[in-house]
């Protein structure tokens, strides 16, 4: 879907609350916090980091099966595909 991207799985024990995945394409990045469903609970600081990244002009989203296609399409546009 996005050839050339680098996808990193972040270590939850390093900084608690940082989104699960970092996706880089050139100088652009996206962050995804993966959940099993729309109703899955959020761990402490997850909302803080997702909101902070978005407030600073970045792209961060909670993604789950119910919104996966929409979020991946947004990410694709955000990275310039």
Image: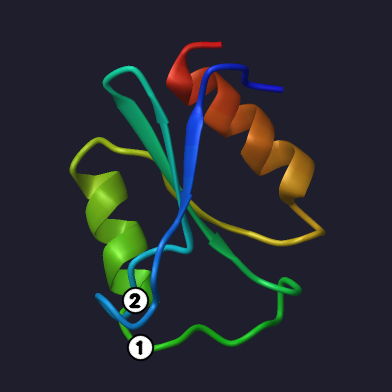
Using a 10 Å C-alpha cutoff, classify the residue at mark 1 as few (fewer than 14 neighbours), some (14 to 19) or many (20 or more).
few
Q: Nearer the viewer, residue 25 or 61?
A: 25
Q: Which residue is mark 2?
A: 17
- Picture quadrant where residue 37 is located: bottom right
Helix, strand or loop at label 1? It is: loop
38, above or below 58, in the image: below
How far across and how far down the image is residue 26, in percent? 33, 17
- Callout 2: SS: loop
Image spot of residue 50 (x, y percent):
36, 60
Q: Is residue 52 above or below residue 14?
A: above
Give how far apart the Cα atoms at labels 2 and 1 are. Answer: 6 Å
Quadrant holding the N terminus: top right
Along the line of sight, the residue nearer the viewer: 64 or 27: 27
Q: Is 43 left, or right, of 55 in this rendering? A: right
Are dots 2 and 1 in contact, CB under 8 Å? yes
Residue 44 - label: 1
């Amino acid at each position: 879907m996005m050839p050339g991207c680098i996808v990193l799985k972040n270590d939850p024990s390093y900084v608690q609350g940082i989104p699960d995945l970092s996706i880089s394409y050139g100088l652009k990045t996206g962050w995804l916090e993966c959940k099993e469903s729309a109703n899955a609970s959020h761990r402490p600081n997850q909302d803080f980091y997702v909101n902070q990244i978005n407030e600073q002009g970045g792209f961060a989203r909670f993604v789950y099966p119910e919104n996966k296609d929409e979020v991946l399409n947004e990410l694709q546009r955000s990275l310039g595909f």
